Structures are given as structure tokens and as C-alpha cells.
């Protein structure tokens, strides 16, 4: 079945540092790929998405590129802020025709001032 | 507020009791999903509806779990004879059919604690 693997946390960075959170996937067909974010005490929010190979999703300074050849969708941000502290989930949908999202385990990001 | 809402936000119950959760999706969203999230894990898909029809159920959805969406609007998730292993956050999400591919909007969740 479909699966998503993302780097384990917590990841601790200083403010203004460069961020990469790795995500790789296994899926049949042509899935859509997503990054969701969960801020403390809040629900899951869609951060960005990409629906086909080589698409780049971007939002709030975050970017991720759908790499079919490496089955990856790594999340990057050039300069993180304390307010980016949250749990980030990589997810896919539609790989084998299934409609539910398949999530990774999440990466807890801590940004220190 | 036009987002997905869930009720209650927290539920504490004793083992063996039945519990029911409610989800109100975003208006006119045809598809409604239920997920379960345990501590330190990502959400796991349980089931989804298109309008009132339940189209897919995960193997995680044991016989003690039942979900309904009788009028194609709100949905309920019932757990019978709760067990301690049912303790988790239960998330609801919705999306329109034909909307941006597979993008789902999540509610705040119902946290269940079984003692």
C-alpha cells in the first residue's frame, strides 16, 4: 500500500536558519502530494500541495517540489521564524485510486530565538 | 465561521461505554472523511462518504466503529464498547468533489480518553 516516510524530529533550529524536512513516498499511480502543518493547540492546516511531477508548491515562504524520479517532496524554507514552530506532516492522496490521505508520522519543528 | 466543526472537543469515558462524535463539514462539501491520530503519529484514514454514501472503509475500522451521514450533511462516528486502545484524536475533514485535487479541510478534532 501507499506510505510516506519523513524525517524524525524534533528538529531544532535558530531563527533565520535554513530549513529542510525530508519526505519520501511509495505509491502506485500518480498521487497528489501535500504538506500539512499543525500549530500548538490547533487543527491541521494545508500548507502547500503539488499534483504532478515537477510541480512546485509554495506558501508563506515554504516550498516543496514533486520529484517523481526520487519519489520525494522535501519541504524547504530559507529563513525560519519562531512562529514556524509546529508539527509538519507530509501526505499523499490518490496514488492507487484511494481517496483518503496517507500521512507520515510528522516532524516537530522548534525554532529558537 | 465556515470551517469544519466537531463536537465534542474532548470526551472522557470509561472502558466499555459507547461514545458518539459529530462532524459538520464545510457547506456544500460532498465528501467527508474520518481519521484517527494517536500521540506521535500522523492521522490514519478510517472512512469517507460522498453525500450520504459510505464509499470506503479502512481495515482500522473495526466492527465496534460505525459512521453515518444520513442526509449528506453532518456525520456521526460511534464507538461501541470502548477500549483503552481507542484513546486518540478523531479528526474529520471535508472537500468538494471536483475541487482542487484531493485537498481536504480538517476540523479541530475530538480527543477521546478511555479510562
Image (spheres, coloured by chain):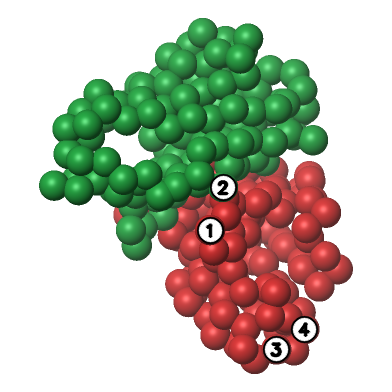
- Secondary structure of the residue carrying numbered label 2: loop
Residue drawn at the location 62% of the way across and 74% of the way down? B87
- Disc nearest the viewer among 2 and 3: 2
Residue drawn at the location 51% of the way across and 8% of the way down? A54
Q: Position of residue A34 (x, y in %)?
A: 51, 31
Q: Residue A83, relative to residue B14: is it above or below? A: above
The reply, left or right, for residue B25 in relation to residue A59 is right
Q: Residue B76, relative to residue A71: is it above or below? A: below
- Secondary structure of the residue carrying numbered label 4: loop
Q: CA distance from mark 3 to mark 4?
A: 7 Å
Task: Tell me which numbered mark, 3 or 4, is placed earlier along the sequence.
Answer: 3
Query: Which color was chain A given?
Result: green
Give the chain ID for the red colour: B
Q: Position of residue A50 (x, y in %)?
A: 50, 20
Which picture quadrant has residue B41?
bottom right
Residue drawn at the location 17% of the way across and 39% of the way down? A15
The reply, left or right, for residue A96 in relation to residue B43 is right
Residue ID for mark 3:
B15
Contact? badges 3 and 4 (CB < 8 Å):
no
Q: Residues within 10 Å of mark 3 (few under 14, many from 20)?
A: some
- Secondary structure of the residue carrying numbered label 3: loop
Question: Is any part of residue B18 visible from this angle?
Answer: yes
Task: Tell me which numbered mark, 1 or 3, is placed earlier along the sequence.
Answer: 3
Q: Residues within 10 Å of mark 1 (few under 14, many from 20)?
A: few
Residue ID for mark 2:
A105
Q: Residue A89, relative to residue B109: is it above or below? A: above
Amino acid at each position: 500500500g501507499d506510505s510516506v516516510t519523513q524525517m524524525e524530529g524534533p528538529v531544532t533550529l535558530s531563527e533565520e536558519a535554513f530549513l529542510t524536512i525530508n519526505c519520501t513516498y511509495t505509491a502506485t499511480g500518480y498521487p497528489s502530494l501535500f504538506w500539512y502543518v499543525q500549530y500548538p493547540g490547533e487543527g491541521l492546516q494545508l500548507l502547500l500541495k503539488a499534483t504532478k511531477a515537477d510541480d512546485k508548491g509554495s506558501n508563506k515562504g515554504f516550498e516543496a517540489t514533486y520529484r517523481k524520479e526520487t519519489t520525494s517532496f522535501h519541504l524547504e524554507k530559507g529563513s525560519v521564524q519562531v512562529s514556524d514552530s509546529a508539527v509538519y506532516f507530509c501526505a499523499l492522496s490518490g496514488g492507487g485510486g484511494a481517496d483518503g490521505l496517507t500521512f507520515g508520522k510528522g516532524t516537530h519543528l522548534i525554532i529558537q530565538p | 465561521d465556515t470551517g469544519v466543526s466537531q463536537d465534542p472537543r474532548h470526551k472522557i469515558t470509561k472502558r466499555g461505554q459507547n461514545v458518539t462524535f459529530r462532524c459538520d463539514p464545510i457547506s456544500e462539501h460532498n465528501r467527508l472523511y474520518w481519521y484517527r491520530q494517536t500521540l506521535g503519529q500522523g492521522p490514519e484514514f478510517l472512512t469517507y462518504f460522498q453525500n450520504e454514501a459510505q464509499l470506503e472503509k479502512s481495515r482500522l475500522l473495526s466492527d465496534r466503529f460505525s459512521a453515518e451521514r444520513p442526509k449528506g450533511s453532518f456525520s456521526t462516528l460511534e464507538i461501541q464498547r470502548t477500549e483503552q486502545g481507542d484513546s486518540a484524536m478523531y479528526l474529520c475533514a471535508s472537500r468538494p468533489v471536483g475541487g482542487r485535487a484531493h485537498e481536504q479541510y480538517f476540523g479541530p478534532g475530538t480527543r477521546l480518553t478511555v479510562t
